[in-house]
Structure formats: C-alpha cells, structure tokens
Amino acid sequence: MYDFTTLGAIAGLAIAIVLIIKKVHPAYSLILGALIGGIIGGGGLTTTVDTMVSGAQSMMSSVLRIMTSGILAGALIKTGSAQKIAETIVDKMGEKLALAAIALATMIICAVGVFVDISVITVAPIALAIGKRANLNKQCLLLAMIGGGKAGNIISPNPNTIAASEAFGVDLTSLMLKNLVPSLFALAMAILLASFLSRKRNGLEVAESDVETSEAALPGFLPAIVGPLVVIILLALRPIAGIAIDPLIALPAGGLVCMLVTGNIRNLISITEFGLSKVVGVSILLIGTGTIAGIIKASALQYDVISLLEALNMPAFVLAPLAGILMAGATASTTAGATIAAQTFAPTLLSQGVPALAAAAMVHAGATVVDSLPHGSFFHATGGSVNMSISERMKLIPFEACVGLTATLMSVIMFLILG
C-alpha cells in the first residue's frame, strides 16, 4: 500500500528543517532529508532514490513556469515599470492605503492563475519601491503580498484548485467561487496584520540596495502597466472564455510586451538574463522540494492521519480542513498538500455525507494555513524576493498562518451555514 513508514517521512522532514536552520543550502537539505527519511522509512536505497527522482520530476512544470516568470520580473525591473507603478500607487492612493494596494495586487495576479510564489516575486519589486518611499519595513510588505497571494490562491485556476476539483469530482469554476467569501476575509486579515507590523521598527526597513531600478528615464504609467495587464487578460481567458493560456506562455508574453511598449526590446538579452538570475535559485529549490514531497506521498503518513482522526471521533466534516492543514504542513506546499489531502481523504469524506463541493473548498482552504514552512520552496522564494534572511523570514510564519486560518474558518462557517 505504501513504500515508506510515517516515522521515515516525519524524520526526513525534521532532518531537512534542522539542516536548513543550520544554514545548509535548502536544496541539499531537502534532498538529504528525503534520502535519510526514505531509508529510515524502510524503503531501501533503490526505492528511495527512485521515489526522490520521481518526486523531483513532478516539479518540472512548476520549474518551467517559474523560470519563464523571470522574463516578466526582469522586464518590470529593468524598464523602470515597477518603479513607475510603485510611485503612481503611492501618489494616487497615499501611504495609508499602500499595504492594501500591495495585498490586492498580489491577490488579483494569483487569482487569475499565476502561482502564488510567482505572484509574490512579480509584485516584490513594486512593493520594495513603495516600501522605500513610504518608509515601510520588509516584514509588513512581504506579509501583505503573501496574505494577498493566499487570498487569491483559493479562488484561482491554479494546480491546487484543479487537483481538489478533480479528486472530489466538482466543477472547477464552482470550487473557485465557493471560497470567494473566505478569500475576502483572508485579504482583510492580511491587510490588518500587515498594518500592525508596519508600526514596528525592527531593522528591516527597505534599503537603497533592496530597490532595483532602471538607470533610464521611467516610462509613463500606461506603458508601465501594459505588460502586467497582458498577463492578467491572457490568464483570465480560462475562467471567462474557456481558453486556457498557461502561465508558461502568459508570463513571458507580458514581459515581452512590457519591453516593447517601453522601448526596451533592444535590451531583450540582458533583461532576460537578469530575470533568470532572479528565479534560478527558486527553481533549484523546487527540485529539492520535489524529492521530499515524493517520499511523503509514498509514505503511510496520510493513512495514519485518517486513523488518528477516526479514533478521536471528530465530526466527519472536520477531516476536510484538518487534512488540508496537515498535508500542506507536511509537504510545505499548497499544491502538494491540497493534492495529497484531496486524493487521500475524498472517498472518506464523501462516504460520510459531506457535500463534495464544500469538502473540496475546506480542504483547499486548509492547505493555505501552514504551507510556508522552511522545508518548502515557497518559504525561500518569498523571503528571497525581498532579501530577507531565513531567521527573519521565519518570524512571519505565525502571521501567515493567521491569514490561512481565517480563510479556513470562513470556509467551514460557509459549509455549516449553506452546506
């Protein structure tokens, strides 16, 4: 039924987390944790390595999308578009609404189908420029982006939503709409917590070196936003018109349009090389993440969780959010957590009479609570986007969990009220 024991899976995760905290490169930490965990779990060396390779291969689609997202990020930075957008937001909305604007922008980009880590990477240059101008610290900026991303992720046509809809046999659009109210509450919580952190002076203020700007004259506001608008429009075609434009195409297309309309297309090679340098580390981390996720998926962990919850005699519907929380925490990934939880627990939930759409929504929302632990790529990708150290990044985890928990509780309340 499974290749590895629960003990092995947990041991592998623990080893990876300890190594990361000890400042061993996260990718190597994850790979070594997966290897040791697999062997401790009784899989044998050959089975362990094969499972690690298979897990890493499953991440290749994400790696490709993140690599191509570098074209858009590089274009926004090097053409001066990010700085122009940031200046316009602060000028028009004022410093008091800057955090709300950052959270909303990240939410929208993620909601139209961009991965949450890519959404944060894309908005980060704008957020840092705003933070420097408005004297905001990097903690509140990153929390606004992550919180907005979490809010957008549970109403997006992203792989995690698709996996949950397929496992429960529900319509993708219906599942996206089911979590709309929880998404709005999560957004409000993100803005509230980010505002609270903005009042702290903790040595994490945005420095000049954190803000990447173009040496050339800044473009006008309209040319600056054309690239991101192209991305949003292309990705919105899937839920609106049923035309699927993958982020692999939409993100670089937006970057190319950005370069073209700002008159920087002649700098295509240097801009794309710069963009790649911004995401290559994240791509490598994803490969390491895949190895540990592969061990988790092939372990007895999910079966033992079912047994534990049944022994506690908890109401059947509670299994849905708890499954999402536990599996996402184990894999440090919304996508992996939602996928494993949905595929594993769907039959049990449906057999207990929990409506498929509500169960899928609660699993999906639950997967956003502790999906940003240090053994996952999201933790490092988002921290790196604002040049934040691992110890500084870890201090945000409780605040992020509050945002995800807000969405989860609202999803449960929606089920209790509407079914």
Image (cartoon, rainbow, N blue to C red):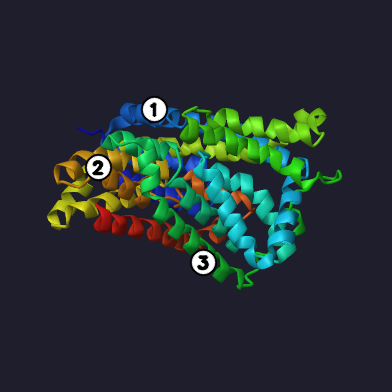
Determine the secondary structure under disc 3.
helix
Tell me if I can see residue 300 in this picture: no
Q: Amino acid at mark 1?
A: Ser
Taking the spot 18% from the left edge, 52% from the top edge, the residue there is 316
Which residue corresponds to mark 3?
193
Q: Is residue 317 left or right of residue 311?
A: right
Determine the secondary structure under disc 2.
helix
Instruction: Give the x, y percent position of residue 342.
Output: 29, 40
2 and 1 marks in contact (CB < 8 Å)? no
CA–CA distance between discs 1 and 3?
Answer: 39 Å
Q: Nearer the viewer, residue 35 or 121?
A: 121
Taking the spot 52% from the left edge, 32% from the top edge, the residue there is 237
Closer mark to the observer between disc 2 and disc 3 = 2
Closer mark to the observer between disc 1 and disc 3 = 3
Closer mark to the observer between disc 2 and disc 1 = 2
Which residue corresponds to mark 2?
356
Name the quadrant of the N terminus.
top left
Q: Going from the N terminus, do you reach mark 2 or mark 3 first?
A: 3
Taking the spot 35% from the left edge, 59% from the top edge, the residue there is 410
Q: Amino acid at mark 3?
A: Leu
Determine the secondary structure under disc 1.
helix
Which residue corresponds to mark 1?
54
CA–CA distance between discs 2 and 3?
Answer: 32 Å
